Amino acid sequence: MNYNRTGKSGLLLPQISLGLWHNFGSADNFQNGEEIVKKAFDQGITHFDLANNYGPVPGSAETNFGKILKNSFQGNLRDEIVVSTKAGYKMWEGPYGEWGSRKYLLSSLDQSLKRMQLDYVDIFYSHRFDPETPLEETMMALDYAVRSGKALYAGISNYNAEQTKEATEILKYLGTPCLIHQAKYSMFVRDAEHDLLSVLNEKGVGCIAFSPLAQGLLTDKYLNGIPENSRAKNPDGYLKIDDISEEKLQKIKSLNKIALQRNQSLAQMALAWLLKDSRITSVLIGASSVNQLKDNVESLKNRSFSADELNAIDAILK
Ligand code: NDP
């Protein structure tokens, strides 16, 4: 594993991090999830990403992760991993169960710590920008989370470039620098390239790219139909069969040909393609099996692209 510095902070993150959005809830096989987390750590993946609502049921990924930590990460191993969680999307009923108020963020963080049986998380995120709450209030909640020792660093997710600029300036003024931005970024979703990455670079904030495989589309999984054991077929999965259009499939097939010429799987090429940009601190993958995890980690063996390869990829993605 290689480790990158997160923006201008002291924290190093692995180039590949593991997210527990799918496959780790109470509806999933616990042993499989535990094996994936343990194998990830053995491969040098020291960063595990959660959110209050990951499941299903919401909260159960944190509960299961807490059990995995109790079973397999005893003693000082807690100091060898970076755990993040978030609050922003709907978690409980009533007016205090979502968005960006201080009331919601801080009570949600307390709930997350209880579920994971932890004293602190390493990174606490505002999961989305709240247009109705003053940004100062949301950022003050992150600042307080850090000052109270319940989080070591503060992060934001799904904020656009302008919102990011403002948020980082408020956090800097408060004395808790913004560590990292968690942004959706893959070959298929390139919005971050417009302004966000340059803002983050300018402000010294790291970037962790979520859904770097476009939820599995940027793998060889859907080349020959939609397998039963796929996120697209899972009724709880966020990827829908309609997302796999004929046009998209043609692009996947063309990208797969380039990957094979590079002696990589499509998943490996898709991750390497993100990591070639030094502004990307880490790619935040999901995995439904240990084999997928191993396949993805192999991407680190070849992260350079010729100009011809990059042009060919851009032509396909247009
Ligand atoms: P990916 O784009 O990496 O998709 C992961 C899925 O792709 C796997 O579950 C698996 O699906 C399939 N897959 C992975 N590797 C392979 C492989 N080598 N070969 C074939 N198929 C493969 O990421 P996710 O969409 O899961 O997101 C990753 C993390 O990002 C989340 O867990 C979460 O932590 C974070 N995230 C953050 C968000 C935010 O708003 N901040 C929003 C969404 C995610 P299958 O089940 O089909 O096998």
Image (cartoon, helix red, strand yellow):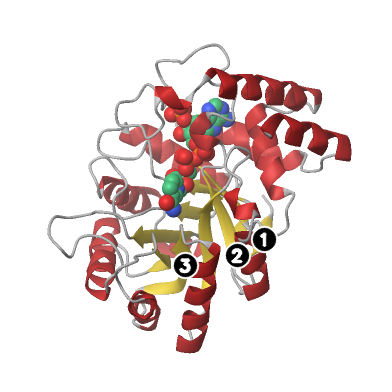
Instruction: Please state if 94 lies on the left or on the right of 67 as rendered.
Output: left
Q: CA distance from mark 1 to mark 3?
A: 17 Å
User: In this rendering, does residue 287 appear at all?
Assistant: no
Q: In the rendered structure, find residue 206 and report the number of the disc placed on it.
A: 2
Judged left or right of residue 213, residue 299 is: right
Which badge, 1 or 3, is on the more N-terminal residue? 1
Q: State which quadrant residue 317 falls in.
A: top right
* Callout count: 3
Give the image location of residue 18, x and y in percent.
50, 47
Disc marking residue 4? 1
Q: Earlier in the sequence, mark 2 or mark 1?
A: 1
Q: Could you tell me the amino acid type at mark 2?
A: Gly
Mark 1 or 3: the one toward you: 3
Q: In the rendered view, would you say 235 is above or below 208? A: above
The residue under the point 31% across, 53% down is: 66
Are circles 2 and 1 on residues that touch, CB within 8 Å? yes
Q: Secondary structure at mark 1?
A: strand
Q: What secondary structure is marked by label 3?
A: strand
Q: Can you identify the residue that label 3 sits on?
A: 155
Mark 2 Cβ and ligand 1 under 8 Å apart? no
Q: Residue sitting at 55 percent across and 17 percent down?
A: 246
